[in-house]
Image (cartoon, rainbow, N blue to C red):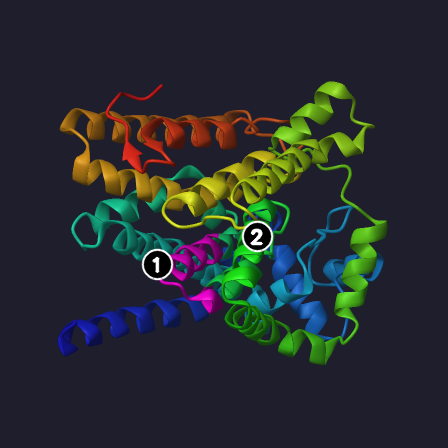
Amino acid sequence: MSPRKLLVRLGLIATVLAAVLAVPDWLTTEKIVYGNDFFQYWSAGRFVLEGGSPYDHQAFFEFQKSVGWENSIPFITWNPPWAIGLFLPFALLRYAPAVMLWLFVQGALIVGSAILLWKRYSGSREGERLVVFMAVLFTPALLSIIFGQISGWLLVGVTLAVLGVEEDRAGFVGAGVVLMSVKPHFTFLLMLALLWWGLRRRPLAFIAGSSACLLLLLAVPLTQRPTLIVEYLNTVLHSQPREYVSDTLGAGLRLLLGWNHFWVQFLPLSVGIGWLCREAVLHRGSITLEGDRIPLLALVSALVAPYGWLFDNVVAIPALVLVWSDLSRHGSRSTRSRFLGGFAGFCLLLLGLHVWLWDPMQWVHGWVPACLLAVFLHYRRPEAGHVAEAGPP
């Protein structure tokens, strides 16, 4: 990059940051505050900075009411303590600039991950802009940005895992596992496979990478509240979020078989763990993660996850980038056109369902992980690394 281009980009970033920090409070209307998931992160960060615990739900509820929350129930955060390190810096700002900066950062994480994945899979910069547009316009990614979700860090974790495995850098894989664990319920199967791979392949580097990432994220939160980890474990063990109807196969089965059967929600995950153990046995104790195995496992993890929502499906972006990379090199023009047309139609369908039918207490998007996995398997056979020339199913 030439010095001139570098200065221009730095100037643009500085301009955006200055504009974000100057955002007036009136832009964060009541509707934006209550309709954006970032409020739970911002209020949790503020509470920790004051020495409180977001896992003490009653105390956290009182704090949220003191900073503008008017709902009858608290906006609880279920993310682990190390996730607090990701949004704690934003809690230093007023809500208005904090939420704007958070949305900007989430968009940058998604774009940056897509670019890194494209360079890894295609080996060139040609076609990079199209991949960026695909990543940002992918409905789960778009909604993740709009709602101020933390899902962008899930994608960063998967991207680090891809780069770490392909370049044999177990430290990257360890850091990726930590970032994915900010929402452990959605990528549990992939995290388990990466943990197995790292501890068998390069245990010291894997432990060093994961430990460094954990220490970095926990350093400030634990200085403010040393008992955060214990309080989080106590909350998870005694106050599970049983009432949430999430967009997962497990939640769908639970709705069919009876909402009082909480264990049904974890049935697909147990099947997925059994499948992963079978893979390890067949490969004599090892798990292969090179090639397209990580994107595949990310999709399978989403399919069997006990909890998850539409925006968490940003973990499908590596699979989409991989398929498009292969199609752009080996697929026919008609195949590429059908794929792009199907992708656009799929995104519009999801957006339409979200706008007109979405209800947090309904199972609307639970079919999405299965659909994404089916498309991936249709266009690419993981064992052979072959791109299918047929049209979409």
Which mark is first along the chain, 1 or 2?
Answer: 1
Q: Which residues are magenta?
A: 155-172
Question: What residue is rendered at 45% in x and 40% in y?
Answer: 296
The amino acid at mark 2 is Met
Left-right relation of 227 to 129: right
Say which element carries label 1: helix
Question: Which residue was labeled with disc 2?
Answer: 191
- Report the magenta stretch's main SS: helix
* Percent x, y of residue 244: 71, 37
Question: Which residue was labeled with disc 1?
Answer: 112
Total numbered badges shown on the rendered structure: 2
**For discs 2 and 1, the disc positioned in front in the rendered view:** 2
Query: Mark 2 to mark 1: distance in Å?
Result: 21 Å
Question: What residue is rendered at 75% in x and 67% in y?
Answer: 229
Left-right relation of 377 to 67: left
Few, some or many C-alpha atoms within 10 Å of disc 2 (few <14, some 14-19, many ≥20)? many
Q: Is residue 25 visible to the viewer in this orientation of the structure?
A: no
- Quadrant containing the N terminus in the rendered view: bottom left
* Percent x, y of residue 256: 71, 19
Circles 2 and 1, Cβ within 8 Å, touching? The answer is no
Q: Residue furthest bottom?
A: 223
Left-right relation of 357 to 70: left
**Image position of 78 with respect to 208: above or below:** above
From the viewer's side, name the closer residue of 24 and 232.
232
Say which element carries label 2: helix
* Percent x, y of residue 91: 60, 69
